[in-house]
Amino acid sequence: MLKGALGAGAVAACALYAFLVVPAQGDMTTMINGSVYASYAVLALSLALIWGYGGILSFGQAAFFGLGGYAYAVAALNLGDTTMAAMIAVAVAAAAAAVLGYFMFWGRISDVYLGVITLTVSLILYRFLNQTAGEEWTIGVAPLGGFNGIPSTPILTPLGDPDNPLPPERIYVLAMAALLLAYVACRLLVATRFGQVVVAIRENELRAELLGYDSRLYKLGLFVFAGALAGVGGVLFANCVFVSPNMFNLQTNGQVIIWVIVGGLGTLAGPVVGCFLMLMLSTYLGTVGDAGGGWLDPNLILGVVLTVFVLVLRRGLLPMAGAAFDRLTAMRPFVARQIVAANTAADRDRRHGSGANR
Amino acid sequence: MDHIVIILLQLAVTIANLALICAGLAIIFGMMRVINFAHGEFLMLGGYAAIVSSRAGVNLWLAMFVVAPTVVGAIGIVLERLVIRHLYGRMIDTMLATWGISLALIGLVTVIFGNTVSGISPPLGSLAVGQYAIGLYELFLVAVVIGLYGGGWLVLRRTSFGLLARGTMQNRVMAAALGVDPGRVYSITFAIGAAVTGLAGALISPITGVVPTIGAAYIAKAFITVISGGTAIIAGALAASTLLGSINTLFSFAFSPVLGEVALLAAAVLLLRLLPQGITGRFFRRSL
């Protein structure tokens, strides 16, 4: 109870900080960085949902992120109406997820192969868009631009006022609001019956099927929702940076996975926290890297962090914080301490057991 | 006529390249079921080992055939002992841990060698076919691949270590009960896989050059080829390389090299929808 209230309080505090304190300070760098982080965090949330709740490890979640961004840029350049373009972009990302999901879940492609297939699809898009530099690669009036991407990506405009693109401060507020909305939407989704069936399938697919649920359909539904979410992230990213093939590359795909692992697999807030922390770390390393004699190469640090989290800190930051909180509150009564001890033992057994089974 | 000969030779070269970059992965992933996402970086390290040692005055052939496999094999043993042995049987975790290792290796090599392309010019000359020419070195690679896969087949089929390795991978507990030390077998097999990868990286480096981030160019291709191959590692890797390499060559000639690569990956995804168990899950089932 107390922990749930504290968690909700923490989310509210972060939201207040993001919506009131940061705009009031008016630091443009913070706001632009904040918008980029928020767009990535929406992507992290989409992976947190399908991997943490659905047990589907998509190593190519950035495919939908990039598709959303590209679809937005192309549609906005052609239509001139950015609101419509944003909706088209999300629809394109969802449709791509539906096609790929149908392909994988009806083909009964299982865990690891799923990761490699999704990664391959993302890399296909990366390779393809990287070579679209010539005149012949133009959709309507929008040139795809090869490895340069589309630097002239239009910025979102208010409804009914298509000639006034939003300034960066408004994009920041929009990105943060989208992140908060996406978080709430995911929270609600996992609380529904649908969300619970999805968790049941993650725990034991065969058992869920024997209970009469078509696991393929549920997985597809979750995958499409997550694809649409990643598409939203891509639209936001297109608005605060611009679209380029790098949205699809191995680096982007891997980063999302690191955020989820660091923040805590199986939670929704954890990956968002992990995303912000790791991006702040990367930004920081980027600024000190040259001065520090080059030893602080961001890849080196990220790689070591990921390996250590997988080997030693398997549960991720947020669940570890939760466990620490439990230990603190159980300090006083003796009985409560016994219960916690028993729970931890059971938890450990379960984790070891499932570890061996996988 | 000359044109056809050149296309056929090019086809053989493409297939051999594919078979070469996925040979080490066929051992580590195909046999040991360890998702080695650092495979591309092992190739990169092999390339650097060969280039650095040949610049330091080592004979080029010695650098490629001895130094590179030794160096990468040693790195493989260290990583296996430090990280991977804790994660056997947990596929997703090995995938994440090796992805971390891959990032760390990219970072480390960038720190040491910088972010520029290093290369050596391919030895041997070129072979003229009418008005066309093809690098003799590339044809030499075809021979090496034949030797490598033939040797692999002999080791797995005819030596006691091959038998032990296959048995241990099939049933670790049973092998341990029969007096085999599974940890050692795993360790050695991983090292051999790494060494083969290092050799492959060294052999490719004169053609492509090396940068710290070159691994990303190979990783998806290698994985999708091994997975398309299916359970029989040697026959599978060869069959998948032949099929995907042909598609790659076809599209490269018809459109562009990049689209050739796109077609390769797309064909593999399609193939897995049709044959989820890979080629050898359906055909050549009793092969190795």
Image (cartoon, rainbow, N blue to C red):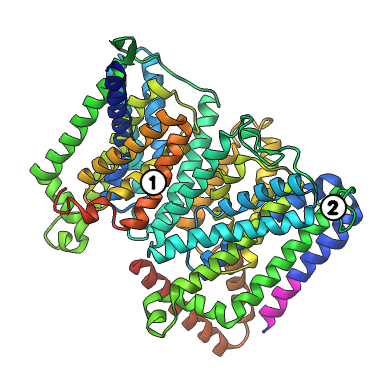
Residue A48 in the image, given as x and y percentages of width and height: 57, 64
Label 1, secondary structure: give it.
helix
- Residue B282 numbered mark, or none: none
**Quadrant in the rendering for residue B178:** bottom left
Q: Considering only vertical position in the picture, is A181 above or below B29?
A: below
Q: In the rendered structure, are the residues bearing label 2 and label 1 in contact, judged by CB atoms less than 8 Å apart?
A: no
> Which region of the structure is painted magenta?
A2-10
Q: Do discs 2 and 1 share a chain?
A: no
| Amino acid at circle 2 | Thr
Q: As rendered, which of A326 and B99 lies closer to the eye? A: B99
Q: Quadrant of the N terminus of chain B?
A: top left
Q: Mark 2 lies on which chain?
A: A
Residue A204 in the image, given as x and y percentages of width and height: 40, 76
Q: Considering only vertical position in the picture, is A332 above or below A222?
A: below
Q: As rendered, which of A237 and B151 lies closer to the eye? A: A237
Residue A293 in the image, given as x and y percentages of width and height: 63, 29
Q: Distance between the residues labelled 2 and 1?
A: 41 Å
Overall secondary structure of the magenta section? helix
Residue A141 in the image, given as x and y percentages of width and height: 72, 39
| Amino acid at circle 1 | Ala
- Residue B267 numbered mark, or none: 1
Magenta-colored stretch includes residue A5: yes
> What residue appears at the point 21 percent right and 60 percent down from the top-left corner?
B172
Q: Considering only vertical position in the picture, is B111 above or below A184?
A: above
Q: Mark 1 lies on which chain?
A: B
| Label 1, residues with CA under 10 Å away: few <14, some 14-19, many ≥20 | some
Magenta-colored stretch includes residue B193: no
For the question of whether residue A41 can be seen, the reply is no
> What residue appears at the point 52 percent right and 64 percent down from the top-left corner?
A51
Q: Mark 2 points at which residue?
A: A157
